[in-house]
Image (cartoon, grey):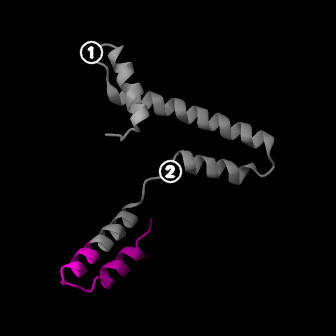
Amino acid sequence: MTQLSPQAQAVLDAVCENTEPDCDTQHLIAAAQWGADQELEACCEWLRTKSKTALWQTEALRAARRPKPPSLKKLALLQLDVLNADLFERGLGRDLSQIRRALEQLDD
């Protein structure tokens, strides 16, 4: 399920209190995200009409407002770092360099 900010959860709770009992939370979240996406695109379009250097600005705005989740490769490398630290802390140091090199060879 999508993780919501406390403010968004409060709004969602208020909406669900005032809707039918069979209110589908996922549909409400999708509708809110759609509305936010529409607003973001409108802001990017406005920015493009006002600035000659808008391409990088709109991409920066989009990246800040809709960050991409880390890739499986990135998550695996982070988990490998945690495993390596845990093993080192317990005095069970192992050479994980081959696993790291194999993960680094993967496409993002």
What is the crowding at mark 2: few (fewer than 14 residues within 10 Å), some, or many (at least 20)? few
Q: Nearer the viewer, residue 79 or 24?
A: 79
Number of callouts in the render?
2
Three-letter residue code for mark 1 = Pro
Residue sitting at x 33%, y 84%: 97
Mark 2 — residue?
67
Three-letter residue code for mark 2 = Pro
Q: CA distance from mark 1 to mark 2?
A: 33 Å
What is the crowding at mark 1: few (fewer than 14 residues within 10 Å), some, or many (at least 20)? few
- Vertical placement of 12 versus 19: above or below? below
Q: What is the quadrant of the C terminus in the image?
A: bottom left
Residue sitting at x 42%, y 58%: 70
Rendered location of residue 1, percent (x, y): 31, 40
Rendered location of residue 53, percent (x, y): 77, 52
Mark carried by residue 1:
none
Mark 1 — residue?
21
